[in-house]
Image (tube, helix red, strand yellow):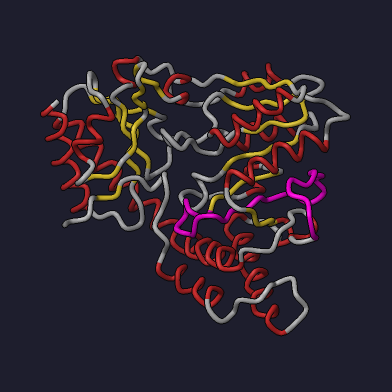
Amino acid sequence: MVQPIYLDYNGTTPIDSDVFETMLPFMEHSFGNPSSSNFYGIIPKKAVETARRQVAGLINCKSDEIIFTSGGTESNNHAIKGIAHAMVDRGKHIITSMIEHPAVIEVCRFLEKMGFSVTYLPVDRDGLVSLSSVTEAIRPDTVLITIMHANNEVGTIQPIAEISRLAHERGIIMHTDAAQSTGKIPVDVDKLGADLLSIAGHKLYGPKGIGVLYIRKNIKVEKFCHGAGQEMGKRAGTENVAGIAGLGKACEIALESLENYMTETKILRDMLYKELKHKIKGVKLNGHRYKRLPNTLSLSFKGMDANRLLKKTGLDVAASAGAACHSGGVEISHVLQAMDVPMELARGTLRFSVGRMTTANDIRRAVEVIVGAVNEQ
């Protein structure tokens, strides 16, 4: 059986072969606890610190500003809850956007139950947050702004550097969820002005179950996970050495290949878009035309049902839908709703995301399959 063409790299990425090789020793003979003082802890401890430097190199920060977590979701939880509790004496207001990942939105909703106030900023039809809406939302008791760097569904890249300047002028902490952008476009914490930044290993050809929270020096964040003193006392729990080593290697590879990656994925993404637009009537692009991740393509097929399309293409093309079918009807993603995409388009929305292993032949075959599925509906 021929494997389906994988066009869901924003969902997860395969582990790079070099990353896998880096991880193997820590699942075999180098099994020691990096926090132990005996011989078996020496190599694992060195691996953790090497990975810390590799991650820091990718996002341009100091290695002791890197905290390893179990993934992007934990990093977002740690950042938002940690700042909220650390700054509670100053204020209880948080600003975010309506198109954040659930790992941000659900945290904010939880904090609302705890007495915090949250402003959910709207976006325009391109999925962009406006600077004026940020300015208008800021209050004397605002302690945190958390806006994602790039959207996971439509790929729109937010003006994080400009939002950070607005925040810092008023003494407000800035966090950005960079799970989708890290390894795909330049992510420099100084240029972005981020005080905290979240990374997920499995989005950049690293393993699942490992992530990073960058915390700028002198930013006070309450602990999220209590216990022993691992991760410089900021995140308790025995380190996932294999995962950490793998993520470090993935970040090293991402830094070395970033320019080629951006060029090559954009060519393939645009090839897919042009071919589908040419062969199918009523195709609409979602997300900003230019301020968008180079690998991400969200398309609405007018009058179509995305889940039916996925069923028809599932054995040949792996993608994801922007709407989910339930017994009570169709539920449109909160991102498409916030962008005010009409129902007749939103219910027929698919996200295609290309990656490092995608080829031009993959795109040609995918076009044939998708066009055939649309014509059958």
Q: Residue at x 60, y 30 (%)?
A: 106
Q: Residue furthest front?
A: 327
In-image side of 171 versus 313 (left or right): right
Q: Measured from the top left, where is residue 120 in percent x and y?
A: 61, 21
Q: Measured from the top left, where is residue 91 in percent x and y?
A: 83, 26
Q: Residue furthest bottom?
A: 39
In-image side of 72 versus 230 (left or right): left
Residue 166 location, quadrant: top right
Looking at the rendered structure, the number of numbered marks drawn on it comes to: 0
- Asked whether 78 or 340 is in front, the reply is 78
Q: Measured from the top left, where is residue 2 in percent x and y?
A: 17, 56
Question: Is residue 122 shown in magenta?
Answer: no
Q: Measured from the top left, where is residue 84 in percent x and y?
A: 77, 33
Main SS, magenta region, reads loop
- Asked whether 193 or 312 is in front, the reply is 312
Q: Residue at x 16, y 57 (%)?
A: 1
Residue 185 lies, with reference to residue 243, above or below; the image says: above
In-image side of 154 versus 4 (left or right): right
- Asked whether 188 or 41 is in front, the reply is 41
Question: Is residue 219 shown in magenta?
Answer: yes
Residue 205 location, quadrant: bottom left
In-image side of 19 versus 289 (left or right): right
Residue 376 location, quadrant: top left
| Region rendered in magenta | 201-228
Residue 278 lies, with reference to residue 258, above or below; the image says: above
Image quarter hosting the C terminus: top left
